[in-house]
Image (cartoon, rainbow, N blue to C red):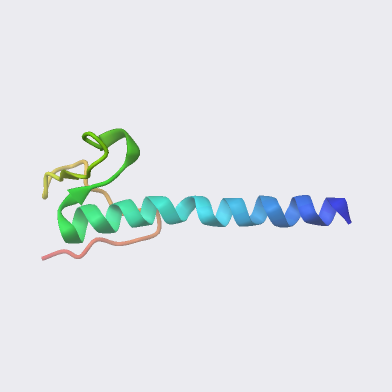
Amino acid sequence: MQEALWTVTLVLSLLLSGCGDAAHWYTRTFYGIDCRPEKLNNGYCVPANKGTADVQPPPGKQADQK
């Protein structure tokens, strides 16, 4: 029983860990703000530099090419 609980906890944590990366990519790409914890300025999101090399899609996502 305890083994199953650890397995479920591990699987859920692995699945949810990727959600933060996708959320940060979407806010940078579509709203032009960067809300990653290391980029916050006094607790607020900062404007993102659109069109630069640091704006990358999360793994498995394709960027729209125009």
Residue beneath the point at 15% across and 45% down: 48
Which residue, as the protein is rendered here, is positioned at the far front? 42
**Quadrant of the snapshot with the N terminus:** bottom right
Numbered marks: total: 0
- In the image, residue 66 sits, relative to residue 50, either above or below, namely below
Does 57 sit left or right of 64 as displayed? right
| Rendering coords of residue 14 (x, y %) | 58, 51
| Rendering coords of residue 41 (x, y %) | 21, 35
| Rendering coords of residue 10 (x, y %) | 67, 50
Which residue, as the protein is rendered here, is positioned at the far right? 1
Residue beneath the point at 82% across and 56% down: 4
**Quadrant of the snapshot with the C terminus:** bottom left
| Rendering coords of residue 51 (x, y %) | 11, 49
Residue nearer the viewer, 28 or 64: 28
- In the image, residue 38 sits, relative to residue 52, either above or below, namely above
Does 5 sit left or right of 18 as displayed? right
The image quadrant that residue 65 belongs to is bottom left
Residue beneath the point at 20% across and 65% down: 64
Residue nearer the viewer, 61 or 35: 35
Does 16 sit left or right of 62 as displayed? right
Residue beneath the point at 18% across and 50% down: 33
